[in-house]
Amino acid sequence: MAKEDKQYGTHADFYGRVSEPANARALEVANALSKAFSKHIKREKVDVIIFENLNALELAKAIQNYPIILKPLLAACNIAGRAIERDLSIKNVDIYKPRINKDQAQIIAGYIKPFLPVALAVPAIAFVDRVSFIDKEIRKGKGQWEKLILEAINR
């Protein structure tokens, strides 16, 4: 199927359309936060991952050796699991507990590398993952309401 025939674009297509306004907003938000909380800002030393210095093979090895990092890295890139399935044709990847082989890790790393920021603080990545995990668990619980009701009726 030719790209023109698809009813959707790739993540890179969508990203390209919103990248410039997103960058402008990020600067505006950072500036506003700095001004709004100027009396409460304190510089701290934290671990920062310099993604700019990381090549795709190193990234793939990290993902394969520590698969729990896949979801937070995807979140840092604003990439959903369905983009992995749709754009890379890697099916049934549980992004919270992935089981991926070396080839899949390399494909995914090559795909997400261009979307990673130059650098990102470890606590920020962990916090974004926490928010995503909480959201997933809440949605999962809400999605089970029919099952709970049926069990109650059957009792």
Image (cartoon, grey):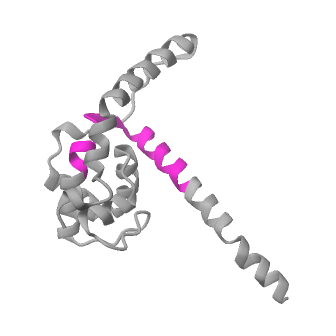
Give how far across and how far down residue 41 sits, in percent. Answer: 51, 17
For image coordinates 79% across by 77% down, the residue present is 149
Q: Is residue 111 above or below residue 102?
A: above
Residue 149 located left or right of residue 2: right
Magenta-colored segment: predominant secondary structure: helix
Give how far across and how far down residue 101 sits, in percent. Answer: 23, 72
| Corner quadrant of residue 1 | bottom left
| Corner quadrant of residue 64 | bottom left
For image coordinates 39% across by 55% down, the residue present is 80
- Which region of the structure is painted magenta? 112-133
For image coordinates 29% across by 53% down, the residue present is 9
- In this view of the protein, which residue sits in the foreground, 42 or 124? 124
**Quadrant including the C terminus:** bottom right
Using the rendered image of the protein, determine whether residue 118 is visible from the camera's viewpoint.
Answer: yes
Question: Of all residues shown, which one is farthest toward the bottom?
Answer: 154
- In this view of the protein, which residue sits in the foreground, 141 or 13? 13
Question: Of all residues shown, which one is farthest toward the front?
Answer: 5
Give how far across and how far down residue 40 sits, in percent. Answer: 57, 16
